[in-house]
């Protein structure tokens, strides 16, 4: 299971885990959104609303694809956020882990707030 994400000129794939959140996202594609940034994280709204899963986490590794249930958004951290306490991304709150960005997540640094986003099955 994969998602193909285009953020402005950036193209990436997310290898999805077999979770209820990932399945809900796949069922909702294609959809469009707009990029927002928070430190070294790109996030964007989705048409999906799901509950927090039992293994949700707040501190993850760069490149971990997450779903922020409080904002119905995909969060793609690639480095430190404003609340990080070490080199790892610390999300605004616990999030469902949905997969991993394929390749170097640092290329997300080129994303700007307001960039158009397209999400499709990948």
Image: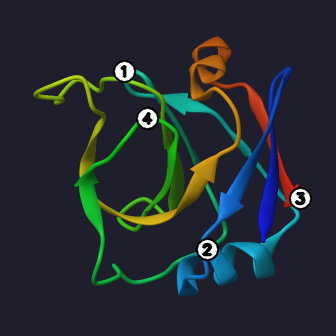
Residue 104: x %, y % from top left: 64, 26
Give SS at disc 4: loop
Res 1 quadrant in image: bottom right
Q: Nearer the viewer, mark 1 or mark 4?
A: 4
Instruction: Kindly check if marks 3 and 4 are in contact, taking CB atoms under 8 A apart as contact.
Output: no
- For label 3, the residue is 122
In the rendered view, does 79 fall on the left or right side of 31? left
In the rendered view, does 75 fall on the left or right side of 47? left
Q: Which mark is residue 48?
A: 2
Q: Residue 62 carries which label?
A: 4
User: What's the CA distance linking mark 4 and mark 2?
Assistant: 23 Å
Which residue of the protein is positioned furthest toward the left in this rendering?
A: 85
Q: Nearer the viewer, mark 4 or mark 2?
A: 4
Image quadrant holding the C terminus, namely bottom right
- For label 1, the residue is 39
Of marks 2 and 1, which one's residue comes earlier in the chain?
A: 1
Of marks 4 and 2, which one's residue comes earlier in the chain?
A: 2
**How many residues crowd mark 3 within 10 Å: few (<14), some (14–19), many (20+)?**
some
Which residue of the protein is positioned furthest toward the top in this rendering?
A: 110
Of marks 3 and 1, which one's residue comes earlier in the chain?
A: 1
Q: Residue 99 or 5: which is nearer the viewer?
A: 99
Instruction: Kindly check if marks 4 and 2 are in contact, taking CB atoms under 8 A apart as contact.
Output: no
Q: Residue 55 or 92: which is nearer the viewer?
A: 55
Q: In this view, does 16 lie above or below 55?
A: above
* Residue plotted at (15% across, 25% down): 86
């Amino acid at each position: 299971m994969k998602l193909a994400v285009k953020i402005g000129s950036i193209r990436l794939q997310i290898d999805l885990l077999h979770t209820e959140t990932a399945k809900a996202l796949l069922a909702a594609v294609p959809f469009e959104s707009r990029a927002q940034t928070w430190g070294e994280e790109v996030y964007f709204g989705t048409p999906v609303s799901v509950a927090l899963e039992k293994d949700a986490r707040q501190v993850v590794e760069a490149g971990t694809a997450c779903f922020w249930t409080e904002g119905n958004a995909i969060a793609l951290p690639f480095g430190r956020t404003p609340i990080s306490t070490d080199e790892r991304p610390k999300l605004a709150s616990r999030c469902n882990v949905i997969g991993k960005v394929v390749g170097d997540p640092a290329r997300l640094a080129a994303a700007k707030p307001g960039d158009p986003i397209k999400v499709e099955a990948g």
